[in-house]
Amino acid sequence: MDGAGSQEWEAAEGARVLRGALAALTRDGTFPLDGLTPRSPASAAEGAGRVPGLPRRRRPAESGAAPAPEDLPALLARQSHRLRQLETLIEAAPVGIGLVQLDGRTPLTNDTLRQLLGYSTEEFAAMPFADYTVPEDQAENDRLFRAMVDGEGSDGFAMQKRFVRKDGTTLWVDLTVSLVRDADGRPDYAIGMVQDITERKRLADELAAAELHYRLLVEHVPAVVYIAEPGPEGRFEYVSPRLEWMLGRSPQEWLDDAGEWSRAIHPSDRAMRTHEEAVREGLGEGGQLPSITYRLRHREGYDVWVRDDAVLRRDSDGRPRLHGVLVDVTQEKTLEERLAHMVDHDALTGLVNRSHFHRLVDEALAGRVDGRRGVAVMYVDLDDFKAVNDSFGHAVGDRVLVAVADRLRELVPPSGAVARLGGDEFAVLVTGTPAAVRRAVAAVQEMGQVSVPVGGAWARVSASVGAAVADRAHTTEKLLHDADQVMYDAKLGADRPGRGGARRGAVARRGAGERRGVVGGPAAAGRRAGDRGPADEGGRRAGG
């Protein structure tokens, strides 16, 4: 080969190397290098995995006819100019580029790569890439590189890895490596391209840590967090694992079946105002929807009260989505019901109290229709209760009051009501047909004694009962007054000498402005404090 031919071959070889680097960078081998025309591979196997557009090395013997001597200086000048352009382009590339020999050394690097890692051209040429790779990433890098060279995969690979800078700090990079083959199709060298992703990696790691932090918060907060489409059949896009703890159902069940939520709502609560109504009324982005409280059925069959709070968001396509929280408020609801019960009921006996009883009488009188529905009120006052407290103490007295309440509950129909007005005074409301009212009044008047065992003795009380049956002229106050007066008369009558144990008062009826009594038999099975009967032998008298 003459000198001119040798110079041409060296120029072509340099262009081939740099063009390979450019092709690896741009994936486009069309940079115009005069006189260098890629040839097609001799076979599919030869061309498989080559970097697009890379020309093969042309030996002088394969070059064909040499250019005319007078054209060679011009050709070399053009090639030299193109090489300088290509070198400038690669040096200015925003990513690091290096020519990697098969032994791992990098004899050719651009300025970006040298700036990224801090090594000089000579240092890169002397060190295999293993020397500046973080040890934890080296095994995978070696595996991919050897597989590429040995033809076990494609002629290239990509990975994220860490390099060690000259100053000892770590650099995260996206690494892309492409294999370049020689004219015979054998691996010749590789072009490596690296992009600094250290900051992106840091941000990604921080984002992943934040996502994990908030996911743990969401998954462990004592509430169900959800994202869903509005509407009874709206699809759930996310449900936190707390759902299984709250309702015994897995989040996947709600995600797979859009109707699971609406079917779980208690039938009495399905008419509630729902979130989608607020959406239809034009609630804006980020708007807080009204809080709603309803019951959801647990898998095991019991109801769970939940409070549902949500805000409206829109997804990337502008579609409305509910971002909400379901909080189990069963305990709060139970407490509310208990407090409401305490307001209207006696704490000791569980009976309704005076104010609630008055409201019930109001409602009963308001519900009368043409006299076909009877209403009666009875006042029940215990006899000898003070003696029980004095003899046995107030704890036993409380047991006696509870026993009286239980006896009255047994005697009064479900449509009626029993109240403790205070102390040892009770009241009864009965409603129904006139015949049913008469039967209920008679049953209470014949309630008999109530006894509570105390060690080897018995604490016993009887009762005086006064009843008043309402007519069209009765108001609540007048009906209660009449029953109280009849009870008072019965109690006075029982205490008069010669009256024995009679405790049942007259049944008062108002009519034509006068009260007429209907007198019955004894109310307390006939025993007053101090009386003894066969059942009392060996026992203690209620009065002491």
Image (cartoon, helix red, strand yellow):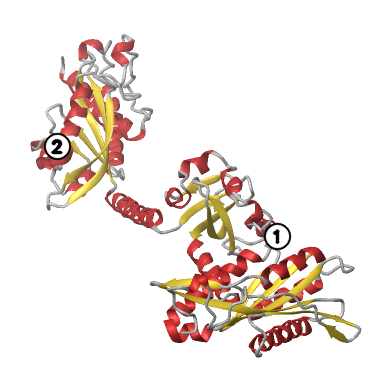
Q: Residues within 10 Å of mark 1 (few under 14, many from 20)?
A: few
Q: Name which quarter of the figure residue 150 lies in.
A: top left
Number of residues whose C-alpha sits closer than 10 Å to that of mark 2, classed few (under 14), some (14–19) or many (20 or more): some
x, y percent for residue 119:
13, 46
**Pick the front one: 119 or 11:** 119
Relative to 246, say whether 1 is above or below. Answer: above
Mark identifier at residue 129: 2
Q: Is residue 207 left or right of residue 363?
A: left
Q: Amino acid at mark 2?
A: Phe
Q: Which residue is label 1 attached to?
A: 281
In-image side of 168 versus 371 (left or right):
left
Front-lying residue, 35 or 389: 389
Of the two numbered discs 1 and 2 on the same chain, state the one appearing first in sequence. 2
Residue type at mark 1: give it: Glu
Q: Residue at x 87, y 77 (%)?
A: 472
Determine the residue positioned at 48% across, 64% down.
331
Give the residue drawn at x 31%, y 17%: 48
Say which of marks 1 and 2 sits in front. 1
**Whole-percent x, y for residue 444 in the image:** 67, 71
Judged from the image, the secondary structure of the residue bearing numbered disc 1 is: loop
Question: Can see residue 393?
Answer: no
Could you tell me how far apart the alpha carbons at marks 1 and 2 are, in whole angstroms? Answer: 65 Å
